[in-house]
Image: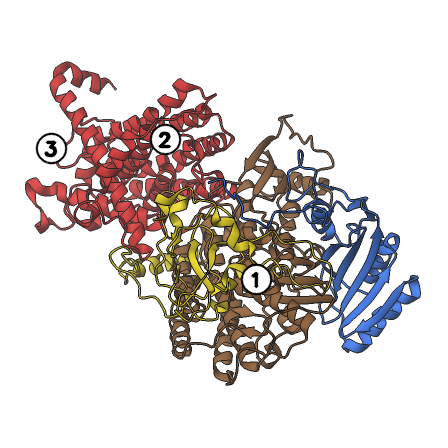
Chain colours: A red, B blue, C yellow, D brown
């Protein structure tokens, strides 16, 4: 965090502007993602999706936001009000903060931390706190169950997530996102998803679990515990939780694209767009987001014990073993080189 | 644990059921009608008859229990099926408006809810039932048994004149 | 576990196929599906043909038809015949079972293709057909009498009562019209 | 989370007859108390209006008590106050996913009282309609199972097929759900001339879609298998004891099908198999339903091919007044055995009508099977039973 404070000292204006930009971007991203989610689900389910507000329904998110703003914010009678109201913020802020360290293009990174990956891990783990706060504050059996599930799941899946990041860190030799992207080069076969393929899969799976989406959406568990920790929320607090979910989904896609798919790097050298290289970053992120949604609408959900089994007995061993293989391979090839 | 389903000719099976029930119990009335063995028994011996049917004759399925309010007495019909075309219909008549019948849940566990329903709708109590609560109606504050003929319902329009 | 993930991938293939497939939504208010011939929509009455036999009123299980009857020489034959001066069908009760249509001897009551029965007030769903509005809140049919076994059906011998009940002045004329 | 032994222990604690705990004060090894949870009647995943009072030990259910009656209309009392033909539209409202079977069962019971000869064409039309109804019930119930497991898409594919069947029903009967089509003595009206063609084309379309949308999408899915295999595993004895019928019974391997064992209508003239499976769990019931859909398609084809010409309504008087006595009607509805018992006193309203609805009887399974399972397993067990609110609440 020292770097952030330093930033604040040196260029407070720039920091404020970046933060406002990030908030603006994240909120918009959430809106766009709700729209995309609804369209993708509709097309998979042989429907058209929202198509009444604006051209082809494109203004639907605006209408949603307007509706949610005008709704009353109901809180349960015996809830712990401050915890209840603080929980959505505790969920939303981490999802928004990490965007500060994501490099969109070579120079377009708001805070080029040299410990970006550590920052990312540290901040996302706050998200579990928000879930527990929401579940505890609402004072409902369903919320409580959802919150406990959420906490258990997010903490468990953080382990394979971090372990799979270690592979990237080892290969790149740096904790900075920018360095990782530069280290991956501008040809798609040198990107890390190929040499670290098992880790890529593990990271992808645990990031789905981290953002609580099907097949790991147990904290919500619509058909069992009816929305879980967010069952009692309405109006803008609910919208904030929803925005947090979509923001963290976008965030996870962006991190996957950055760490494993070469960030802003073009797939082949001659496709280099110069200043417009952020297009590549956007495309990769969008692709990952689409696969998130595609999976979401194709598969059922796991059970809690199976989820834990899968996390601890499958993902963690795979990562550990592959970490060892990577370390060994690096040692050997260093000798050769 | 597989269940054995009865085999053989339908007529011989019906005969066997009738004989089996006749030999062990004093039936008030019995006979074969199509593929149905009709049996009329005393209400106290219903569990014994049903136990014979299930344990020694191998009739495994209790289809339903119908209660008919005959205004002064209740007629109970236990419909048994052997899964292969034969049916056994055990009837019993209980006098009185507050009838008590021994339960058959220990023989046919599926009778649990049938008996609860009969209790709810007619007030026929089943002695020895493990969980005799109302099925449909309110547990407290409702003292009627809706299917009794003595409970008149309005066949007029609901909410007449109320709108 | 040789084929882990295969089933999921297969399923995702199916959803991907549908993502680009033909959509089946019908844009309802703009596009209305042609209804088949037998479709049972809201009831309507051809009052010119109605002979006020009250059969539809008696057969209706939901008590949704009320008819106000009067002796009148409508066809100029010099003989006073039953004539339906008021006829109301309460769509908030109707269950579209079509029993009245089948029982009508002159086929004057029939289903239309209309099915959008929505209103702000339940009374608006009571549609008047006769020259005089009938109060739809009053049930013209008597309650079913407790019958003795093998006696004539309820409904017989209660003729006439049907016409009398609604003769009280209708309370809500403005809505009936 | 409880260990396997402890789960086994707890299922031993439950009394076999009612599923209620002998000793409700179950505490786990840390002395923590159980929590009560109230699921329903307003629950998005609950099948209709059912309330489950659950006692949870962590995520494990130790007691499950279904409370019914939120949709109870006392159909049996209503039927006592109506003339025989006017009861038929009310039977449509019983199990609203198997309306044709309810009508058929009731009509069979009245015909049992009346002793009328049904024209063969009417019988074939009844069977044709009933089998279409079975398709229209089984396909969504597969979708419901998946919906409860968290996959939202299959239900929409299922409803696409169901809507097509409903369009056929609408052309034949005039209504999409509450048909009032099968009448005492036959059916209301003959099939419209273009309907056989429509049914043929529908079946062709269904056969084309069925494999990909309901088998490929679901069957091999590892998550689906892990969620359903071994859940609500029951032995044949248990299933028979509980009085189960229909797919929940057949998925344990008991080949009981009323269409074959207690034949009615023209089923003896048609060729079809009874589908059984050995699993006895939720996955097996899914496979049974899938295979029964294919059997239904077979029956529909045979019906269309064998359909005789002639009248569709028997000659009977206008007023139906059966003699004193009792009538029984029993059909294989998609959920199991639907039976109607009518007691007549010789007047033109029934003296007593009793419906034996499969949803009601099969639901006892919840009380028995749910304790010992995890909370999320309740939903697949509901999918195994597939009860319908209008059915169990009559």
What is the crowding at mark 2: few (fewer than 14 residues within 10 Å), some, or many (at least 20)?
some
The disc label shown at residue D250, or none: none
Going 53% across and 68% down the picture, which residue do you hit? D292
State the image coordinates of residue D284 (x, y, percent, origin top left): 56, 60
Chain ID of residue with mark 1: D
Secondary structure under tag 1 reads helix
- The residue closer to the viewer here, D154 or B82, is B82
Q: CA distance from mark 2 to mark 3?
A: 40 Å
Give the left or right position of residue D69, taking residue D307 as reference.
Answer: right
Chain ID of residue with mark 3: A
Instruction: Say which label, 2 or 3, has the lower sequence index.
Output: 3
State the image coordinates of residue B88 (x, y, percent, origin top left): 78, 66
Q: Residue furthest top?
A: A9
Q: Mark 2 — residue?
A: A234
Q: Residue furthest front?
A: C78
The disc label shown at residue D86, or none: 1
In the rendered image, the vertical position of residue A64 relative to residue A11, given as above or below: below
Instruction: Tell me where residue A128 sits by quadrant.
Output: top left
State the image coordinates of residue C130 (x, y, percent, origin top left): 39, 57
In the rendered image, the vertical position of residue C162 relative to residue D326, given as above or below: above
Residue A118 shows in this picture: no
Q: CA distance from mark 2 to mark 1?
A: 46 Å
Residue B87 shows in this picture: yes
Q: Nearer the viewer, mark 1 or mark 3?
A: 1
The disc label shown at residue A107, or none: 3
Secondary structure under tag 3 reads loop
What is the crowding at mark 3: few (fewer than 14 residues within 10 Å), some, or many (at least 20)?
few
State the image coordinates of residue D217 (x, y, percent, origin top left): 41, 59
Q: CA distance from mark 1 to mark 3?
A: 79 Å
What is the crowding at mark 1: few (fewer than 14 residues within 10 Å), some, or many (at least 20)?
many
């Amino acid at each position: 965090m020292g770097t952030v404070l330093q930033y604040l000292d040196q260029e407070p204006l720039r920091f404020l502007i970046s933060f406002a930009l990030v908030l603006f971007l994240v909120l918009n991203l959430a809106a766009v993602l709700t729209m995309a989610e609804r369209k993708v689900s509709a097309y998979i389910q042989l429907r058209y999706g929202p198509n009444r507000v604006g051209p082809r329904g494109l203004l639907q998110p605006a209408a949603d936001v307007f509706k949610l703003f005008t709704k009353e914010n109901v809180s349960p009678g015996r809830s712990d009000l401050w915890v209840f109201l603080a929980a959505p913020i505790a969920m939303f802020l981490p999802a928004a903060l990490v965007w500060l360290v994501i490099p969109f293009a070579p120079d377009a990174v708001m805070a080029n931390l040299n410990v970006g990956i550590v920052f990312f891990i540290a901040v996302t783990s706050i998200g579990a706190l928000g879930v527990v706060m929401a579940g505890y504050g609402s004072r409902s059996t369903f919320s409580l169950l959802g919150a406990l599930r959420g906490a258990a799941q997010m903490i468990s899946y953080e382990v394979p997530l971090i372990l799979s990041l270690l592979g990237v860190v080892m290969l790149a030799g740096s904790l900075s996102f920018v360095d990782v992207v530069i280290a991956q080069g501008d040809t798609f076969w040198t990107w890390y998803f190929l040499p670290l393929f098992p880790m890529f899969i593990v990271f992808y799976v645990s990031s789905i679990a981290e953002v609580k989406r099907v097949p790991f959406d147990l904290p919500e568990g619509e058909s069992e515990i009816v929305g879980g920790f967010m069952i009692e929320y309405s109006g803008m607090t609910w919208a904030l939780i929803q925005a947090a979910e979509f923001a963290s989904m976008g965030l996870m896609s962006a991190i996957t694209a950055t760490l494993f798919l070469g960030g802003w790097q073009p797939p082949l050298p001659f496709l280099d767009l110069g200043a417009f290289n952020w297009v590549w970053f956007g495309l990769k992120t969008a692709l990952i987001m689409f696969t998130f949604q595609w999976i979401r609408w194709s598969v059922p959900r796991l059970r809690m014990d199976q989820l834990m089994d899968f996390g601890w007995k499958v993902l963690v061993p795979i990562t550990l073993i592959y970490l060892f293989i990577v370390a060994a391979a690096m040692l050997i090839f260093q000798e050769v080189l | 644990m597989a269940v054995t389903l009865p085999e053989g000719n339908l007529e011989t099976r019906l005969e066997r059921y009738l004989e089996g029930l006749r030999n062990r119990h004093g039936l008030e009335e019995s006979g074969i009608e199509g593929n149905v063995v009709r049996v009329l028994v005393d209400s106290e011996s219903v569990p014994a008859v049903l136990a014979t049917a299930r344990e020694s004759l191998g009739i495994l399925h209790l289809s339903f229990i119908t209660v008919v309010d005959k205004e002064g007495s209740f007629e109970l019909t236990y419909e048994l099926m052997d899964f292969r075309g034969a049916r056994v219909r055990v009837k019993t008549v209980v006098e009185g408006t507050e009838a008590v019948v021994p339960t058959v849940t220990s023989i046919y566990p599926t009778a649990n809810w049938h008996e609860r329903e009969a209790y709810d709708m007619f007030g026929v109590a089943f002695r020895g039932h493990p969980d005799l609560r109302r099925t449909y109606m309110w547990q407290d504050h409702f003292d009627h048994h809706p299917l009794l003929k003595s409970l008149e319902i309005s066949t007029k329009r609901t909410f007449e004149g109320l709108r | 576990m040789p084929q882990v993930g295969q089933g999921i991938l297969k399923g995702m293939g199916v959803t991907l196929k549908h993502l680009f497939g033909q959509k089946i939504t019908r844009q309802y208010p703009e596009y209305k599906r042609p209804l088949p011939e037998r479709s049972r929509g809201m009831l309507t009455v051809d009052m010119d043909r109605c002979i006020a036999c009250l059969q539809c009123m008696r057969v209706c299980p939901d008590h949704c038809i009320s008819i106000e009857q009067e002796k009148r020489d409508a066809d100029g034959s010099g003989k006073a015949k039953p004539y339906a001066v008021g006829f109301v069908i309460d769509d908030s009760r109707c269950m579209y079972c079509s029993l009245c249509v089948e029982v009508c001897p002159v086929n004057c009551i029939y289903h239309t293709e209309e099915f959008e029965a929505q209103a702000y007030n339940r009374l608006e769903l009571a549609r008047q057909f006769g020259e005089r509005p009938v109060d739809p809140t009053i049930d013209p049919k008597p309650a079913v009498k407790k019958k003795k076994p093998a006696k004539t059906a309820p409904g017989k011998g209660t003729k006439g009562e049907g016409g009398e009940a609604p003769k009280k002045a209708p309370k809500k004329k403005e809505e009936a019209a | 989370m409880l260990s396997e032994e402890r789960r086994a222990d707890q299922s031993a604690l439950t009394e076999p007859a009612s599923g209620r705990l002998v000793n409700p004060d179950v505490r786990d090894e840390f002395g923590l108390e159980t929590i009560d949870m109230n699921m329903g009647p307003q629950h998005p995943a609950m099948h209709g209006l059912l309330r489950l009072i659950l006692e949870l030990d962590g995520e494990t259910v130790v007691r499950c008590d279904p409370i019914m009656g939120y949709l109870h209309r006392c159909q049996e009392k209503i039927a006592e106050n109506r003339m025989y033909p006017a009861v038929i539209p009310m039977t449509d409202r019983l199990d609203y996913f198997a309306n044709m079977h309810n009508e058929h069962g009731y009509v069979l019971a009245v015909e049992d009282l009346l002793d009328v000869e049904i024209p063969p064409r009417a019988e074939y039309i009844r069977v044709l309609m009933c089998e279409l109804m079975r398709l229209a019930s089984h396909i969504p119930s597969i979708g419901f199972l998946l919906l409860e497991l968290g996959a939202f898409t299959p239900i929409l594919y299922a409803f696409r097929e169901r809507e097509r069947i409903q369009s056929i029903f609408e052309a034949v009967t005039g209504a999409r759900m509450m048909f009032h089509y099968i009448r005492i003595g036959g059916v209301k009206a003959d099939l419209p001339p273009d309907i056989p063609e429509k049914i043929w084309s529908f079946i062709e379309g269904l056969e084309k879609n069925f494999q990909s949308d309901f088998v490929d999408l679901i069957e091999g899915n590892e998550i689906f298998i892990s969620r359903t295999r071994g859940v609500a595993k029951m032995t044949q004895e248990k299933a028979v004891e509980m009085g189960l019928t229909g797919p929940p019974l057949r998925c344990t391997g008991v080949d009981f099908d009323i269409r074959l064992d207690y034949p009615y209508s023209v089923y003896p003239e048609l060729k079809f198999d009874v589908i059984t499976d050995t699993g006895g769990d939720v996955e097996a019931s899914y496979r049974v339903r899938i295979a029964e859909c294919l059997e239904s398609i077979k029956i529909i084809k045979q019906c269309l091919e064998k359909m005789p010409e002639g009248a569709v309504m028997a000659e009977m008087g206008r007023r139906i007044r059966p003699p004193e006595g009792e009538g029984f009607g029993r059909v294989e509805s998609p959920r199991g055995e639907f039976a109607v018992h009518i007691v007549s006193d010789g007047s033109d309203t029934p003296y007593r009508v009793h419906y034996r609805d499969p949803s009601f009887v099969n639901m006892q399974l919840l009380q028995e099977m749910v304790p010992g399972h995890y909370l999320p397993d309740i939903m697949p067990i509901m999918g195994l039973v597939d009860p319908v609110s209008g059915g169990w609440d009559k």
